[in-house]
Image (cartoon, rainbow, N blue to C red):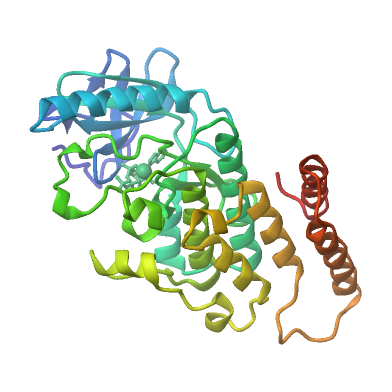
Amino acid sequence: MTSPDPNDTTQGQQAATWQVGGQALTIIADRYELRDRIGQGAAGEVFEAMDTRLGRLVAIKTVPLRATNPEAALRALGEFQHEARAASRLSHPGIVTIHDFGNTDSYAWLVMELVIGENLRNALDSNGAPALAEAVRITRALLDALGYAHGRGLVHRDVKPGNILLSVGIDPGWGQVRLADFGIAHIGVVDAAPDQGPLGSPTVMAPEQVNGAAVDHRADLWAAGVILYELLTGKRPFTGGYPAIFDAILSSEPPPPSTIVPDLPPAFDAVIARALAKRAEDRFPDARAMDAAIALASLSRPASAPALDFEGMLRERLRVRLQALLDTQLEPMVEEAVRGEVRRVVGGG
Ligand SMILES: Nc1ncnc2c1ncn2[C@@H]1O[C@H](COP(=O)(O)OP(=O)(O)OP(=O)(O)O)[C@@H](O)[C@H]1O
Ligand SMILES: [Mg+2]
């Protein structure tokens, strides 16, 4: 594999040769010229590339097709094509755009929008938890993207900090959320031995994923709850190696966030408890409901808060009003209108 020369200031501006699926490659599909390697995941690698036809930079993910079982490889490839096609129909500012995909006998590739920034895993590891307002903003942006995709029948299945890209901009903060790897996260991992446990990223897996049961959009909402927990507290709710982490996911309750961060409004404890309910039917029914609950929690005050100033009084008035609206038993259409009102007043999608 070519190692980039640290003294070469043109690095990233010219084609380079990389090993992909056992071959030395500079160009993919006669069109995408490889440049830098951005990173590596469990199944493949991501490169920065130049789309020589359109003259723009893109990101290209390559996944070696190395299944020892050709039938499984074929099935995985079919699934990859199906999911890539479905994901390519998503058009949302919070979701990484898919431009193109294809495969040879030895690897599959997927071309997507190049995000300049950092993924949330690295951001959390290098910085720790962000300020509360930033934690709330990131989670709500994630839920907005999930709500959009769920509304179109697509479940991500691997919502994790490593798949949340933060696109840097000139605005202060950690950047704009761009969710990557919609539905395609497990392509290539067809050789996993059964004794390695279920496929997925253990720390964010919902109980039904651990159990190998049917999964719907509520597994993504569980993962959003795991991410919110770490954004609020700097700690992961479920830890340990395999299989201890699966026992924790199935049967242990993480400490309420406000016991870790005393300044946190206890309203977040209720949000986390519901997001991480073991049974999917006890969780938020959809991304919008979870978003409204987080918006309301962010309007509430920590137990130790000082006396209300003028702005605090206004926010409290708003919170009480919105809570009363949300607590009312409503017809679905009215409920949707109320949630729309919550979103309008407290911001976000
Ligand atoms: N469109 C993109 N633009 C910029 N960087 C990207 C893009 N897609 C992925 N990356 C980066 O490439 C790296 C590898 O991503 P990849 O999806 O292969 O692995 P992962 O999500 O970290 O882990 P896993 O394979 O376990 O799911 C990550 O650091 C990710 O931030
Ligand atoms: Mg990824």
The answer to whether residue 182 is left or right of residue 109 is: right
Q: Position of residue 244 (x, y in %)?
A: 26, 70
Q: What is the quadrant of residue 132 in the picture?
A: bottom right
Q: What is the quadrant of residue 272 in the picture?
A: bottom right
Residue 205 visible in this rendered orientation of the protein: no
**Ligand 2 shown in quarter:** top left
The one of 277 and 3 positioned closer to us in this rendering: 277
* Residue at the (43%, 54%) spot, across then down: 161
The answer to whether residue 321 is left or right of residue 111 is: right
* Residue 148 against residue 120 in the figure, above or below: above
Q: Considering the image in quadrants, where does the N terminus appear?
A: top left
* Residue 299 against residue 53 in the figure, above or below: below
* Residue 271 against residue 180 in the figure, above or below: below
* Residue at the (25%, 47%) spot, across then down: 6
* Residue at the (34%, 22%) spot, across then down: 81
The one of 9 and 348 positioned closer to us in this rendering: 348
Q: How many marks?
A: 0
Q: What is the quadrant of residue 316 in the picture?
A: bottom right
Q: Position of residue 167 (x, y in %)?
A: 52, 44
Q: Position of residue 122 (x, y in %)?
A: 40, 58
The one of 336 and 42 positioned closer to us in this rendering: 336
Residue 92 visible in this rendered orientation of the protein: yes
The answer to whether residue 111 is left or right of residue 240 is: right
Q: Position of residue 339 (x, y in %)?
A: 77, 48
Q: Considering the image in quadrants, where does the C terminus appear?
A: top right
The answer to whether residue 80 is left or right of residue 142 is: left
* Residue at the (88%, 78%) spot, across then down: 309
